[in-house]
Image (spheres, coloured by chain):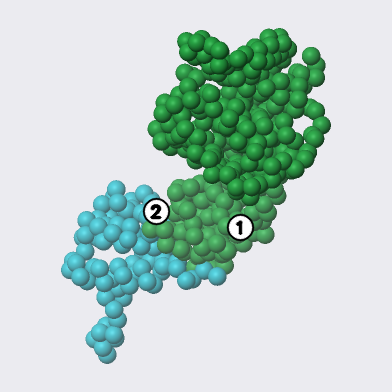
Amino acid sequence: MLTLSLMSQDIYERKCVPCHKELPTSLDQMFMSYLSLYSGEKNVKAVLKYYLQYPSKSMTVMSDLFIDSYGIKNESNLSKKELNEAIDIYWEKFKVFDKLK
Amino acid sequence: MLVLKNKATNLVLKSEKKSLLRFLTLYVTMITIVIALSSLFYYETQEKLMLAEQRAILTKYAYIQTKRLKVLHHYFDERRTYPRDPRFTSAIYDIDLRKIFSLLEEVNIRFDEEIYIGTNHIHFVKSLDEYFLGAKYLILEIKNDGIWREEIWKSIIGYGLLAFLIFIVFGLYLAKLFLKPMRDSIILLDRFIKDTTHELNTPLSAILANIEMMDTDVMVEKNRKKLTRINIAAKTVSTLYKDLTYLTLEQEKENEDEDIALKPMIENRVEYFDILAKSKNITFILSLEHATIFMDRRKLSRIIDNIISNAIKYNKRGGKIEITLNENLLKIKDSGIGISEEKIPFMFDRYMRFNQSEGGFGIGLSIVKKIIDEYNMQIEVESKEGEGTTVVLRW
């Protein structure tokens, strides 16, 4: 049952959401932070991809207080393809386009 | 003196008209360009001024809208309504110039300009420092009522016309100033001709009368030739004298129009000029039909004399003059030096002479033209340099 449930989830649900559940800042808040710093889709995706591959304090969008408490994340073990896929899902899920009225 | 001056002042030569026209064309073109450029500069300055005023207002609006976007950004999970303002409409675009949300009426945005006038709106493009909702550009749009443009056009047309009129008055004054020396010369020449004409009458009449009275049969050949030369010279001066007196005195007289038989008159004038023609071995070829014309005899005489006199004067030695007359046409064709085509329109100008080697004041053909115009006759001149000139009169 658990396996079936995992199988039905996408890579974002499987690889990103579980870890972020533990953190006090939600994924959509993080997305808005990226958006406020990098604006466009290309920029946001590129920065996300780079940060997930090579996480560093200088690249994070989180506050110093957050980093001091939870530290910098570990390097992603996802392949490039998986990473791109996860980022694309993340973008589609939280993007601002077509949501304003 | 005053009458003469007025007469001469009113005399506008074709060349004078041409100079005036050229000057005025150039002048009007120049001031039109100056006024147009000034208007353009004024328009652009006023437009910039208007945009500067709008920029100040729109910067304030942009600041307010940015704050609203900031709030929306932070509460995006709860609120999704884009902030609206009755004073303006707005849109947000991301760094890739992709539209995030827009309330604008005009869709084409010039991101490279901070403020500009679109089709019916003024657009203000604000580049944001913090990309709330991912917006790199905030575009504000307000209605362009066009009142400022109407005001500018009113000013341009008003002041432009005023400047144009002032320039035109100034231009006419300048033109008058430039043409004054030319007019002064004409007045001086007219005065000189009038004064000298009076003095020529008596001695000329005496010479011609005495030549006519002389009995050439009893003269030796040598003296007869000398008398012929005197006769030619006297007749040349006589033609000139008649032109001068016509110009200065007779043209003001009332016309005594009558039916004139042209054939005998032409024959008479040919006979009169025959001695002049023979001196250059010029042959007259006459083809005269019966024709009449209703006009003043003195004036007709001036026309025929002047054309024949010119045909002799500018003919080659041993040349010929063909005179053709039919009901409504008189054609006088010479085999002379001719004149170039571009000079033909000016040959009727007063004091215009194209050949300095021949004598004369250059008034003969201007008299001819005046009389022809007075009687609504037509004159056509065809000429080829080195081949000759044909003058055709129609009535």
Along the line of sight, the residue nearer the viewer: B44 or B11: B11
Q: Secondary structure at mark 1?
A: loop
Q: Nearer the viewer, mark 1 or mark 2?
A: 1
Q: Residues within 10 Å of mark 2 (few under 14, many from 20)?
A: many
Q: Secondary structure at mark 2?
A: helix
In the picture of the structure, the residue carrying the numbered disc 2 is: A37
* Image spot of residue B346 (x, y percent): 56, 32
- Where's the N terminus of chain B, which quadrant? top right
* Image spot of residue B356 (x, y percent): 49, 19
Image colour for chain B is: green
Instruction: Give the residue furthest to the bottom.
Output: A1
Residue B140 placement: quadrant = bottom right
Instruction: Give the residue furthest to the front.
Output: B218
Residue A26 shows in the view:
no
In the rendering, which numbered label is found on residue B367? none
Residue A90 placement: quadrant = bottom left
Along the line of sight, the residue nearer the viewer: B114 or B28: B28
Along the line of sight, the residue nearer the viewer: B351 or B198: B198
Is A23 situated above or below B131? below
In the picture of the structure, the residue carrying the numbered disc 1 is: B120
Is A64 situated above or below A26? above
Give, as a three-letter code, the residue at label 2. Answer: Leu
The subunit letter for the residue under badge 1 reads B
Give the Cα separation between the discs numbered 1 and 2.
Answer: 34 Å
Image colour for chain A is: cyan
Give, as a three-letter code, the residue at label 1. Answer: Asn
Write the residue at 47% across / 71% down. Answer: A98
* Image spot of residue B321 (x, y percent): 49, 35
